[in-house]
Amino acid sequence: MRGRFDEQLDVLHTQMIEMGALCETAIACAIKGLLEGDAENATRAIAIDEEIDRMERDIETLCLKLLLQQQPVASDLRKISSALKMITDMERIGDQAADIAEITKLNNVKASDDTFTIREMSMAAIHMVTDSIDAYVRQDLELAHAVIAADDEVDNYFNEAKAQLAQLLGGNPNRAEYVIDALMIAKYLERIADHATNIAEWVVFSITGRHEGENDGHLPG
């Protein structure tokens, strides 16, 4: 019985890695579309989001089967419950990557030199997503804590981006539509970073049994 359970845990681990890789690809495509004005990459990000949604449902079903059909010990329960929380954040990362892609594609938005902070912010957010998934794959507490700490950097970028956009709007009222779109994109990037932080916090929980995100202002898990 335990052997079969361990096999299913291995399947869960593999599926989590696959879903994480899809999230990384979705946000990379969305940002490439934004930075280069590339509609093809934006379209790809939207398509990948649908695959992420499907994987969320599959992993959720597997987790529930593991909980209902087996008798997991405490460490198993942490792994399974963490997975259930993490896939919610991964799915939302996919959604927000698709939202960025939609704005880029439909409104023909491209990050400009006037809003260079959004470029820096997007790179930092991608890095956080990649590292949060790597922390899960490697069960790396140090990397998970580094992701959690990096959220402050993205928050600072968001504040800088808002200031830059306000200045841009003040000097160029005719660019109001672009400023609104860019501000929405910056907000999506901030939320992507929050979700990456959540993932890292659940990695910590899965390893230690301690969740560090309570009452810290992050998005609910």
Image (cartoon, rainbow, N blue to C red):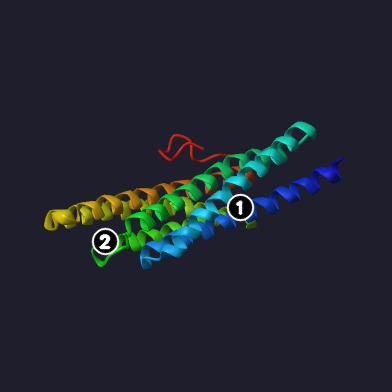
The mark nearer the N terminus, 1 or 2, is 1
Asked whether, in this view, residue 120 is left or right of residue 212, the answer is: left
Classify 10 Å Cα crowding around label 1: few (below 14), some (14-19), many (20 and above).
many
Identified at 26% across, 67% down, the residue is: 113
**Residue closer to the observer: 119 or 213:** 119
Quadrant of res 116: bottom left
Evaluate whether residue 176 shows in this view. yes
* Circle 1: residue type: Met
Q: Tag on residue 155?
A: none
Q: Do labels 1 and 2 touch, CB within 8 Å?
A: no
- Which secondary structure lies at badge 2? helix
Label 1 to label 2, Cα distance in Å?
31 Å
Provide residue 82's location: percent of width, then percent of height: 61, 41
Asked whether, in this view, residue 212 is left or right of residue 113, the answer is: right
- Which secondary structure lies at badge 1? helix
Q: Which image quadrant: the N terminus? A: top right
Identified at 51% across, 41% down, the residue is: 212
* Extreme residue toward the right, this view: 1
User: So how many labels did they put on this image?
Assistant: 2
**Residue closer to the observer: 128 or 69:** 69
Quadrant of res 161: bottom left
**Residue closer to the observer: 221 or 33:** 33
Provide residue 9's location: percent of width, then percent of height: 74, 46
The residue labelled by disc 2 is 115
Classify 10 Å Cα crowding around label 2: few (below 14), some (14-19), many (20 and above).
many
Asked whether, in this view, residue 71 is left or right of residue 210, the answer is: right
* Circle 2: residue type: Thr
The residue labelled by disc 1 is 19
Identified at 41% across, 60% down, the residue is: 124
Provide residue 206's location: percent of width, then percent of height: 63, 44
